[in-house]
Image (cartoon, helix red, strand yellow):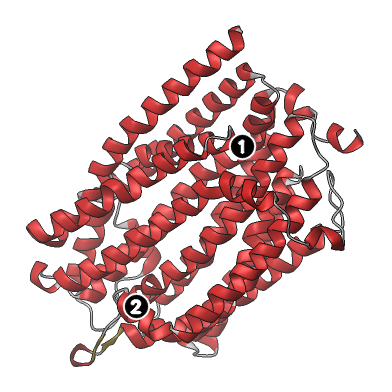
Amino acid sequence: MEEQSQNNFLGIEKVGKLMKMFAIPCVLSLIIQSLYNLVDQIYIGHCNTLGAAGNAATGIVYPLTIIALGIGLWIGDGCAACMSLNQGQGNTKGAAKSVGTALFYGTAASVALMIICLCLKDKILIAIGAQNNPEKGIFILDMSSEYANFIIGGFLFFILACVLNPIVRADGSPKFAMLAMAIGAIINIALDPLFIFGFNMGMTGAALATFLGQLITFVLHVAYLFKTKTFKLKISDLIPSKAIFSILKFGISSLLTQLAIVIISVVNNILLLKFSESSGYDTAITQGVITLAFKVFGIVISVAIGIASGAQPVIGYNYGAKKYDRVKKALLFMMIATVVVGVIATIIFETVPQVFLLIFGDGGQGVDPIAYKQFTCLTFRVYLGFILLTCVIKNLAIFFQAIGSPIKAALITMARDVIFLVPLSIILANANGIKALLWSAPISDVLSFILAVGLTIHVLAVMKRKAVK
């Protein structure tokens, strides 16, 4: 009962206050997580010997990082959802066992992924679009292989930190979760210029700075396990249990969200490699700019997902406690905040896309600066033009995950990123080249938004009927 009382406030405190308490630290945590890769792009972009080719190389490695992130969030978000629903139902006995099980499978998955990627590194990179062009002095394959060494080597720490971060938030310590991520990101930001420029380590320096930041973040999360609020972890809890089935079920939307990004990234890299020259652009420009767009997209989506993830414990607890009015209030707060974020991002992308040239550099040596600027502005204005709808779609997927409807959550996620976006990218690129490909994203956003809103209206009607009964 003492452990249960720790989270009773989720059912009685004002919803607006709870949203601020959970969402703000969660937003900051996810932004900081996105900064790990974004900071690399900034310093690499301003390094004349790396520039657009270096950013293209990180874009090639990006799908591997997202697979690792997906595994971590699959297990971590699933475990956090189990904790919140159980607490709302007054059942807290299985919390420690769930966390121990999550840690066991997180460790096993990270080691397996690390071994596979290290053994097949260059073959994987070539398959997803990496290529050298000695005639133009562009060596994207070599750069991506160099960058991947430390990134893959840090998968154990990265994945386990991603597993533990949502667990720490669900335990009632969102500020600590944010702080742990912030410290690691600050270390990465501080070491990047030192390694890249000071020690002249190039791509290896960028990857090493990321590795060390992730290591510190992991250590801080592990330290938290010795001062948890709603559960006490024992050695015996690390023995895997059947709780893994609930964890994997509730977290499947998070995995599919990240896998969808992987599919999009790989398909784009291959299409850009195939159609860039015929569209009048170097591959370094197209792959480099799309990589930057993905990273900036990731920052905006991190804010939206952070708002939804912050609301998840509130929604999950109150849904489990059958307090449907509070669930609806949390959803309303979540949507209002998300729309504000989406509108601000849209205004920036449509009116001043050239600001990203100041942030990420002009492409470096061997790249036509005029073509680089033109494609950058076009990409941000078109490809990210309907990011407001993307934010809403991602939030509604997390809402369904929070109320224990993983199938609907997965459907919403896969509809936007795989069912619509991937086929449209292939069709439009083959029809009219790279510029046409950019329109695949806004079209997919509109179609997926209609689906997500329709499902949400239905579930709200179901909750209304339950409330009446």
Dot 2: what SS?
A: helix
Q: Quadrant of residue 94?
A: top right
The answer to whether the residues at label 1 and label 2 have Cβ atoms under 8 Å apart is: no
Q: Residue at x 80, y 30 (%)?
A: 90
Res 455 quadrant in image: top left
Residue 187 seen from this side? no
Q: Position of residue 399 (x, y in %)?
A: 53, 34
- Residue at 60%, 68% (x, y): give it: 109
Residue 428: x and y in percent read: 14, 54
Q: Which residue is mark 2?
A: 51
Classed neighbour count for the residue bearing mark 2: other residues with Cα under 10 Å, few (<14), some (14–19), many (≥20): many
- Residue most extreme to the bottom: 134
Quadrant in which the N terminus appears: top right
Position above or below: 91 against 31: above
Q: CA distance from mark 1 to mark 2?
A: 40 Å
Q: Amino acid at mark 2?
A: Gly
In this rendered view, identify the residue nearer to me: 326 or 463: 463
N-terminal of the pair, mark 1 or mark 2, is: 2
Task: Give the side of residue 88 with respect to residue 140, left or right.
Answer: right
Residue 33 vertical position relative to residue 404 in the rendered view, above or below = below
Q: Where is mark 1, residue-wise?
A: 312
Residue at the (40%, 41%) spot, across then down:
411
Residue 254 locus on image (x, y percent): 51, 50
Q: Is residue 423 left or right of residue 229?
A: left
- Quarter holding the C terminus? top right
- Give the amino acid type for the residue marked by disc 1 in the picture: Gln
Q: Is residue 87 depicted above or below 328 in this figure?
A: below
Above or below, 310 against 56 in this view is: above
Looking at the image, the residue that sits furthest to the front is: 242
